[in-house]
Image (cartoon, grey):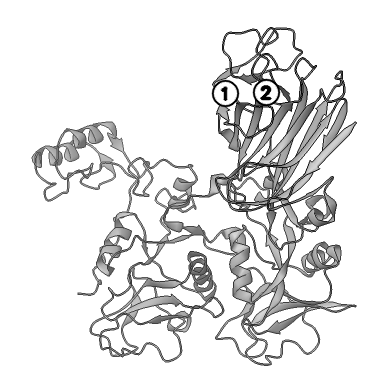
Amino acid sequence: MFKKLCAVVAVACSVGMGAGASAQGWVQIADSVTDFSSTQGQNGWWYGYAISFGEPATVTMMANYTAAQSCGCGNVGAIWHFAPGVCFCSQEFCFQGATGAHPDGHGEPHVPVRRYVLPASGRYLLQPSFSHGGGCQAAEDIRLELRFRGAVIWSASTDGGAQTGSIEIVGNAGEFVELWSVMLLNQCGTYHEVSMRVSKVIANVLPPQEWKVSLGGNGHWYGVYTTSYNWWSATAYARGIGAHLASFKSLAEGEACENLTVNYHQSGPGDYWLGGIQEDTGAEPGGGWRWVYNEAFVPDWRSGEPNNQGDEDCLILNLTSTVGNEIDGACSSSARAIFEWDADCNRDGIVDYGQIMSGAIADTNGNFIPDSCEGVPYGAVEWPTSAGGNGHWYGYSPSGGFNADVTWAAAHYAHLVTWQTLAERTFIEFSLLGMGLGTYRTGAHQDPEGLEPAGGWGWHNGEPWNASVAGWQVGHPANTTGAEDCMIIKRSSSSALPDPYNQSRDCDEVNSSLIEWDADCNHDGLVDFGQIVRGELSDVDGDYLPDVCDCADIIIDGEINGVDLAALLGAWGSSGGANNADVSGDGIVNGADLSLVLAGWGACVSVPAPPSWATVLE
C-alpha cells in the first residue's frame, strides 16, 4: 500500500527524475547516508526531534550520539538520540542513524527530524527515499514528510515496501529542508529506513559530458549553455561555475566537444560561443586569432570565414542541419555557448568538476569549484602553466592610494600588475572581469621627465616596457588633465573589451590596484604565493614569503650567526637601527627578535629584498 502527497511551495514534484529534471545540469552535493556523522552541522546535516503527530512543532537538536546500541532493536549502528542513559528498546525509541530512524510512541510522540541547510541560493533537486518492513495495521504505519518553509511538500507512507520521490525547489542560502518520520498510531513496528540525496542545478546548462581518457580524450567536461547572451556575459557566467568558453587544442577535440554537447543533446542549429578572440592588433580578417587562455589555436573555419563583417572579434561555432564550423561574430551579439570544465586546482591529475560530480571532492556552496580551492586571499587567480600561462597569481589590493598600494604590495612580496605579452594582458583583463565592473590601477607609470603624452612610460619593477602590447584605448595616453601619470584598467560594460588606458589625475583617484605574485624564493619553479595558499609551504607571519625563506638574517649574508646576534644586541630597545634588527616587525628590538635569531641559527635561503620602488612618482 503506497500513499503519496505533493504540495506546491515553490516546488515541482514528480516520481523519478522526470523529463524536467533530466533536461538540466544537476550535480549531487549531499547524500544523507554517506554524509552522516557524529557532528551536528557537518556536511550541512543536522539531527533533531519534534514532539508532534505531524502538525507544526518546534524542532530541538539531539544532544546525544552513541557509537553502538545494544538493546535488541536491530543492528542500526551509530545513532543520534535525545534521551541519554536509557535503553532504546524499553521506553524511548526516538533515534536516527545513517539509514535508520525510529519515532517514539510511548507518551509524547517524539518524531526524528533530519535537516539539511542549503549552502547557496538556487534551484535544488531533492530525492527522498523511504522503506518500512511492514507489520502494521491500516493507518498504523509511518509517514515520511519532506518539509520546506514550514509546509509539507512531499510525503509517503507504507506498511511494507519502498517509496521514492523527486522534488525541485528554489531556495535561499541558509534555508533548510527536513525529513520528518511521523508515526500515525502508537505501538507499531516503526523502525524504518530513510535517506535523501540533494543536487544543485547549473542553471540553463544541459548536463555536461566527459571526454573520457579511456576513449582517447582529455578528461575535460563540456556542456551547452542554453541562454543567449553576448560573448562577455557568457564568459562571466562560465567563470562563476568553474568553467570557461570551450577551446580546442586539436580538431579531434573540437569534434569530440561538438559530439558531446550540441549533437548529444540535439540542442539544434544556431550559433554557440567558443573561447576564441581576435587581438585588437591582429590584421583583419584572419590575423591575431587565439584562445583566451593562450592554448594552441586550431580553428575549423567555414569556407569564406573569418570575414569581419562588422567588427567580428569573437569565435562562434555555427551549427547547421548538416555541418558545424567556426565563424567570426560580433562580441556584442547574442548566442548560446559551449562551456568547458578543465580546472584541476588540487593538481591531482583529475578535472575538479568530475570529482565534484562523483562526490570525491566537497563543493558545499554548489558553484562547482572545490571548497579547498576557494577563499584565496585578495581574490587572486592563477594563470596556470597547464593553460599556456606563466604560473603567476593576480589579485587586487585593499583599497588605498597609489603609494599605499605600492608599499602594501612590496610588504606582501608582490608588485603592481605588469604584462609582457598580449596573452598575459588578456588573462589579466579576464581576471578583472571576474572581479566585476570597476577601475583598477596597474604597475605602469610615466616618468615625470617623460615627454607628454606618450614618453617615459614603464613598469615599476623594471620589467621591459613594450608599447605594442600596452593596449591603450584609442586616443590614449592623452594627459588631458596635465597629470595623468598612471595607467588604469577600466571596465564599465560587460559587453566590451576592457581596454586599459591612463586616466587618473594624480594616481590617487583610483582606490584599488591589481597585484601580481611571481616570486619563487626557494627556486623550485613554482610561485610561492600559490604554494602558500594551497598549504604546500608554511607562512606563519602571513607576508606571503615562505617561512623557509623568511629567516632572521639581519646582515643578509645567507647565514644567521654571531654577526647577526651582535647587530641585534647593538640595536636592543630601538625600532631596528641601521640594520633593521626588528625581525619580528613589532616596532621594537626585544626578546621576540632574539628568539627568532636563535631559532633560525645557521644557513638560510637568500631572498632578494622587495623592490625599492625608487621610481615611484614623487
- The dot on residue 387 is none
Residue at 61 percent across and 8 percent down: it is 86
Find disc 1 in the rendering and name its residue: 62
Specify the amino acid type for callout 2: Gln
Relative depth, front residue between 447 and 224 = 224
Q: Is residue 36 above or below residue 380?
A: above
Quarter holding the N terminus is: top right
Relative depth, front residue between 106 and 121 = 106
Horizontally, residue 438 falls left or right of residue 412, namely right
Specify the quadrant of the image occupied by residue 244.
bottom right
* Residue 252 image offset from top left, x and y in percent: 80, 66
Q: Earlier in the sequence, mark 1 or mark 2?
A: 1
Q: Is residue 608 above or below residue 317?
A: above
Specify the amino acid type for callout 1: Met
Confirm or deny contact between disc 1 and disc 2 (CB under 8 A).
yes
- Residue 12 makes an appearance in the image: yes
- Badge 1 crowding class, 10 Å Cα cut-off, few under 14, some 14 to 19, many 20 or more, is many
